[in-house]
Structures are given as structure tokens and as C-alpha cells.
Image (cartoon, grey):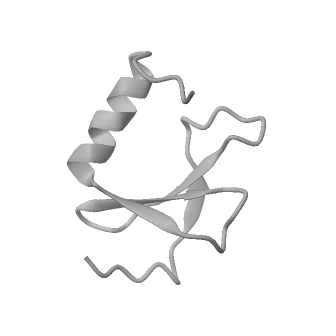
Amino acid sequence: MDVNLTEADWRKSSYSGGGGACIEVADGFPGVMPVRDSKDPNGPALLFSADSWQTFVAAVRDGEFDGR
């Protein structure tokens, strides 16, 4: 999948834990969720399918994943 992220409006994810361990996400890309490391804004971004992202967010919210 080829997604142009040059005009993406990045925001810190509400699920970032702070302390330098933050991720940024970009809304507005139907069917995918772009994710990047906030410490490396010019680095690579990962693209998650919308379903995969929702599954990940639910696992974090439910305490199934603590980021370690």
C-alpha cells in the first residue's frame, strides 16, 4: 500500500505513556492508521490496518499490553 504521509497531521497518541516513550498517529487515512516514534519524526512510519489498530488499542486499554 502506497500512502503519502508528507501532509499528515501528526498528533501524540492518547495512549502514549510519556517519559519519552510516545508515539504519534495521523488521522484521515481511510482504512489505515499511520504510527511513528515521536522522537524520530523524520524516521519511518508504520501503517496498521484499521482493524489491527483497534485490536491493539483495545489490548492496551484492557491492560493486556504494557509496552515492555
Which picture quadrant has residue 37?
Answer: bottom right
- Tell me if residue 6 comes above or below residue 52 in the rendering: below
- The quarter in which the N terminus is drawn is bottom left
5 or 65, which lies in front? 65
- Tell me if residue 18 comes above or below residue 44 in the rendering: above
Q: Position of residue 32 (x, y in %)?
A: 29, 61
Q: Residue at x 45, y 23 (%)?
A: 65
Q: Position of residue 61 (x, y in %)?
A: 42, 23
Q: Residue at x 28, y 35 (%)?
A: 55
33 or 9, which lies in front? 33
Which picture quadrant has residue 10?
Answer: bottom right
Q: How many marks?
A: 0
Which picture quadrant has residue 31?
Answer: bottom left
Q: Residue at x 38, y 34 (%)?
A: 57
Q: Position of residue 23 (x, y in %)?
A: 59, 49
Q: Residue at x 52, y 23 (%)?
A: 66
Residue 66 shown left or right of residue 29 in the figure: right
Residue 19 shown left or right of residue 6 in the figure: right
- Tell me if residue 36 comes above or below residue 55 in the rendering: below
User: Which residue sits furthest front?
Assistant: 68
- The quarter in which the C terminus is drawn is top right
- Tell me if residue 56 comes above or below residue 24 in the rendering: above
